Amino acid sequence: MIPSEIDLPDFAMSFYAIIDFSNEAEFSVTIDPSALVTVSTMNTAISDAVSVKQDKIMALGLLKGDGAGNITGATAGVDFGFPQKSGDSDPTSSTPGMVGQRFLNTATGREFICIAASEGVYTWEAAGANDTADITQNGRPLDEYLDEMSQTQADLWLALDAVVESIPGDLYTQAQTNQLIADAVYGHNTAGDAHGDMRAGMAALDSRTTNLEMIIGGGIATNLFSITFANLAGVIVTGVWNNTQGRIEF
């Protein structure tokens, strides 16, 4: 079955035959000029076809096939990645680009990406971070925050230095403090005038114990009595009364 011209315009069929004839036969050949293609005509047709396809390639960037013999224009950012732009300085709002397209500053190595394009105005921002200036926090560069933190830290150190300088110089460590307390307690306990009430009570207890020993020991024919010197009521003594310790000192 021979397809129609619409279905297959480039269809061609070749016929082969063997003709047996004598040297007395006559042949007549009729050639249709419309079916002939000269070398010049073919070269012209090829040149025109290449020119048309080249114009399409220049206009659309890339072509893509659908696997069925058809070729259409490829879409940047969908069928292939955006071609990267480059220059020796950072892109500006007048640097043309498509949203998603990247730009490389060949002088610094920094890379930018186009995030908006409208009416000839293009917005580029750093792609990735090369330093703290490329990182933002609440719309502000991170290096500004770090500078503020550094200043705040410096102010804190100055304030701390002022506090330290205001502290007296005769401070003690915990070990020194504990030793000083122990020495003070020992000195107080061993002082002759310390704990007068306890000393007076012990003196009275000692006196009563002595009287009991004398009574129990026997040999006493009269009534015993004892005198404490917690006060001098009804007592006449010679000496120095130590009222703190309840005794008479000579």
Image (tube, rainbow, N blue to C red):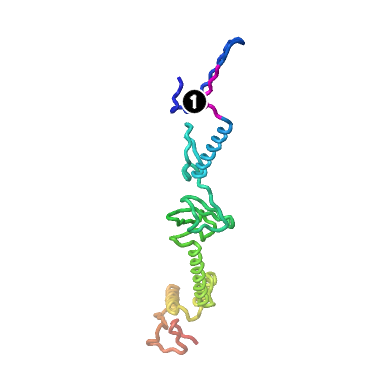
Rendered location of residue 117, percent (x, y): 44, 54
**Residue placed under numbered mark 1 in the picture:** 11
Q: Residue at x 49, y 25 (%)?
A: 11
- Residue at point 50% right, 47% down? 82
Q: Which residues are magenta?
A: 28-37
* Secondary structure beneath label 1: loop
Q: The N terminus is located in which quarter? A: top left
Residue located 41% across and 81% down the image: 226
**Crowd around label 1: few <14 · some 14–19 · many ≥20 (10 Å):** few
Q: Is residue 226 left or right of residue 127?
A: left
Instruction: Find the residue positioned furthest to the left.
Output: 234
Q: Residue 138, position in %: x, y?
A: 43, 60
At 48% from the left edge and 32% from the top edge, which residue is drawn?
69
Q: Is residue 237 above or below residue 57?
A: below
Q: How many marks?
A: 1
Q: Is residue 214 left or right of residue 170?
A: left
Q: Is residue 231 above or below residue 213?
A: below
Q: Along the line of sight, which residue is nearer the eye, 239 or 97?
A: 97
Residue 169 visible? The answer is yes
Q: Position of residue 98 (x, y in %)?
A: 47, 50
Of residues 53 and 165, which is closer to you in this image?
A: 53
- Position in image of residue 193 (x %, y %): 48, 81
Q: Nearer the viewer, residue 36 or 100?
A: 36
**Does 16 appear above or below 187?**
above
The verdict on residue 78 being magenta is no
Residue type pointed to by label 1: Phe
